[in-house]
Amino acid sequence: MGTLLHRELDDAVADLRSISYPSAALIGLFQSISVIPGVSRAGATIVGGLILGLSRTTIVEFSFLLAVPTMLGATAYDMFKNASSFAPDQFGVLAAGFLSAFVVAIISIKFLLAYVRTNTFIPFGIYRIILAVGFALIV
């Protein structure tokens, strides 16, 4: 069992600036696996980065950075597609929702990065497996 668990290498890429362009492109390809329903975008990119030899903290940071253009594009498309559904007086509520989501995301990212520095992904993997089995039993 011990050989199945990821062990961070001593020479793991430990800095975002040290990620090569080919590695970044491969991690982006791993992200594309998340178009499969139920596959976590962050999980796919993190697994890809670990396979390519990045440290846990580096790939988690990169995964969050990789999410920014994805989420901005999806949000812009959704806003464009549904712009007629919003009344002018609703944009304040939309802005408040955006701001609160941004603050919560920053806090969550800081928590996860602190967690990853001292812990493995095993509890998260177990949680995902239990959740998947639970949903499979329900459906």
Image (tube, helix red, strand yellow):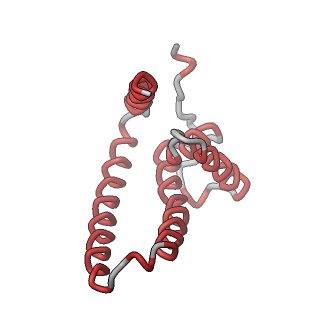
On the image, the x and y values in percent for residue 6 come to: 54, 28
The residue nearer to you, when weighing 50 against 68, is 68
Q: Quadrant of the C terminus?
A: top left
On the image, the x and y values in percent for residue 22 come to: 73, 54
Q: Is residue 98 left or right of residue 132?
A: left
Whether residue 122 appears in this view of the structure is: no
The residue nearer to you, when weighing 71 against 57, is 71
Question: Relative to residue 41, is residue 130 depicted above or below?
Answer: above
The residue nearer to you, when weighing 107 against 81, is 81
Q: Is residue 111 left or right of residue 131?
A: left
Q: Is residue 35 left or right of residue 122?
A: right
Q: Quadrant of residue 11?
A: top right
The furthest residue to the bottom: 88
Q: Is residue 138 left or right of residue 10?
A: left
Question: Relative to residue 58, is residue 12 depicted above or below?
Answer: above
Q: How many marks?
A: 0
